Image (cartoon, grey):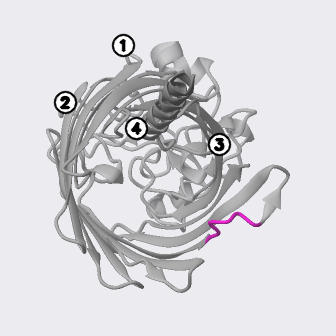
């Protein structure tokens, strides 16, 4: 009897030890312990003097307010599902001049000018977007798969995207390799400058039939003329824009204080790559205007208070574009208070643009809870083969744009950010614990006169 009891006790003890061993070997730290919620707010404003809607001249005033809510949900130990919902609203002096005329017609307009916002419907717009990302981590956390889908919509544009990627960590997680592929299938609902749209509807008779009926059209000398005819204009036959990208990155911890990474992207676009409502004016064509003739001599300056030049054509660009950016990051741990994060990227495309970007950010630990982030970024690019300023294109060219985003320029951006972190999430809002607050302020300036200010504020919460 004692032998039986001894054997039973031994078996129970062995089972208990085996259970402990099994629980030890199968224990996994969750990829994400709790649901996290990020609330992001941003404000952007800019000004400049090279409106693309105005064919390379006119006000570029724009303001945009955007908000995003990002929710990361742990589905189990290995899987995380993330949703990102965003809404933004902007007002723009430039895009308002898609139709610089009063809603009641040209005759109801006191002073159309590219230097002031019009009261047209295109003065403002809203963008709504939503995306979802699913990621799965292997048991050893060395393999990560992810897939994502996205959708966004605004008044004249809709985008649907999908993609996926794989990340491999090895060498005790000191080395990381990632690959990713994405596709965006977009659709324009083309809006054309009003005078070109009227020509498309009524042909050469638009001056007697459309909203320009009975409205005097002026020539360069301010005399009434009936010669304006934008015969180069045709509506787009396609309205789709598809973008495909493949990305590769390699990251390596070199020493206890240095970490580096390199990356390369390959991007291909096809379809309607021009912007339908951006005007172009030809140097070899006569100029025609609507408005007050005394402002014609100062048309391309802010002194112009009351005349608008009628377009010769819309922007016209190739239906394909190939882009290759290649870059690297190098992060230095200087001491327990300061880290240097450096970045460089080289970009080239088959439209003739070559560009260089360099930036540095210096996170400075002020205390256990507060970190400051001074930063500086420099960018320079060559002009596209298809760019020329206001009234410098010729009507014999196959492609043309006066969008200064495709011009030769350099820019600088500098700013400062602050982050407050509370790892114990002591501040509570209902069931949400506040984990961090991030505030960033940046100023951007460009050699063509464009300047902008950007402010962003982010809150990270943890569902407890």
Stretch of the chain drawn in magenta: 421-426
- Secondary structure under the numbered disc 1 in the rendered image: loop
Q: Which residue is mark 2?
A: 398
- Mark 3–mark 2 Cα distance, whole angstroms, equals 54 Å
The question of residue 65 being in magenta is answered with: no
Position of 213 compared to 285: left or right?
Answer: right
| Label located before the other in sequence (4 or 1) | 4
Q: Which residue is mark 1?
A: 237
The dot on residue 35 is 3
Crowd around label 1: few <14 · some 14–19 · many ≥20 (10 Å) = few
- Secondary structure under the numbered disc 2 in the rendered image: loop
| Label located before the other in sequence (1 or 3) | 3
| Label located before the other in sequence (1 or 2) | 1
Q: Which residue is mark 4?
A: 25
The question of residue 424 being in magenta is answered with: yes
| Magenta portion: prevailing SS class | loop
């Amino acid at each position: 009897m004692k032998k039986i009891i001894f054997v039973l006790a031994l078996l129970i003890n062995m089972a208990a030890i085996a259970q402990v061993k099994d629980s030890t070997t199968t224990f996994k730290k969750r990829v994400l312990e709790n649901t996290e919620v990020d609330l992001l707010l941003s404000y952007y404003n800019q000004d400049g003097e090279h409106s693309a809607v105005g064919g390379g001249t006119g006000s570029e005033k724009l303001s945009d307010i955007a908000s995003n809510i990002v929710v990361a949900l742990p589905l189990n130990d290995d899987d995380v599902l993330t949703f990102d919902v965003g809404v933004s609203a902007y007002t723009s002096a430039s895009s308002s001049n898609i139709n610089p005329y009063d809603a009641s017609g040209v005759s109801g307009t006191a002073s159309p000018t590219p230097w002031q916002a019009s009261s047209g419907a295109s003065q403002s717009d809203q963008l709504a977007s939503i995306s979802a990302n699913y990621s799965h981590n292997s048991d050893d956390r060395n393999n990560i798969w992810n897939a994502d889908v996205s959708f966004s919509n605004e008044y004249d544009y809709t985008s649907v995207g999908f993609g996926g990627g794989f990340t491999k960590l090895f060498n005790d997680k000191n080395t990381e390799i990632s690959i990713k592929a994405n596709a965006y299938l977009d659709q324009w609902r083309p809006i054309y400058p009003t005078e070109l749209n009227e020509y498309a509807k009524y042909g050469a008779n638009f001056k007697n039939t459309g909203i320009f009926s009975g409205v005097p059209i002026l020539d360069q000398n301010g005399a009434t003329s009936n010669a304006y005819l934008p015969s180069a204009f045709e509506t787009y036959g396609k309205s789709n824009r598809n973008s495909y990208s493949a990305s590769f990155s390699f990251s390596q911890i070199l020493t206890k204080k240095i970490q580096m990474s390199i990356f390369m992207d390959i991007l291909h676009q096809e379809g309607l790559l021009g912007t339908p409502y951006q005007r172009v004016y030809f140097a070899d064509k006569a100029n025609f205007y609507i408005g007050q003739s005394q402002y014609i001599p100062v048309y391309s300056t802010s002194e112009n208070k009351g005349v608008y030049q009628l377009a010769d054509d819309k922007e016209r660009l190739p239906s394909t574009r190939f882009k290759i950016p290649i870059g690297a990051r190098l992060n230095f741990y200087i001491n327990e208070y300061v880290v240097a994060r450096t970045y460089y990227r080289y970009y080239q495309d088959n439209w003739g643009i070559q560009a260089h970007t360099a930036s540095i950010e210096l996170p400075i630990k002020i205390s256990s809870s507060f970190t400051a982030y001074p930063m500086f970024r420099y960018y320079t690019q060559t002009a596209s083969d298809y760019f020329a300023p206001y009234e410098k294109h010729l009507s014999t060219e196959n492609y043309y744009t006066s969008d200064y985003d495709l011009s030769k320029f350099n820019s600088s951006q500098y700013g400062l950010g602050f982050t407050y972190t509370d790892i114990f999430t002591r501040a509570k809002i209902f069931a949400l614990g506040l984990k961090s607050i991030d505030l960033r302020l940046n100023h951007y300036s460009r050699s063509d006169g464009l300047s902008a200010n950007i402010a962003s504020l982010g809150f990270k919460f943890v569902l407890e």
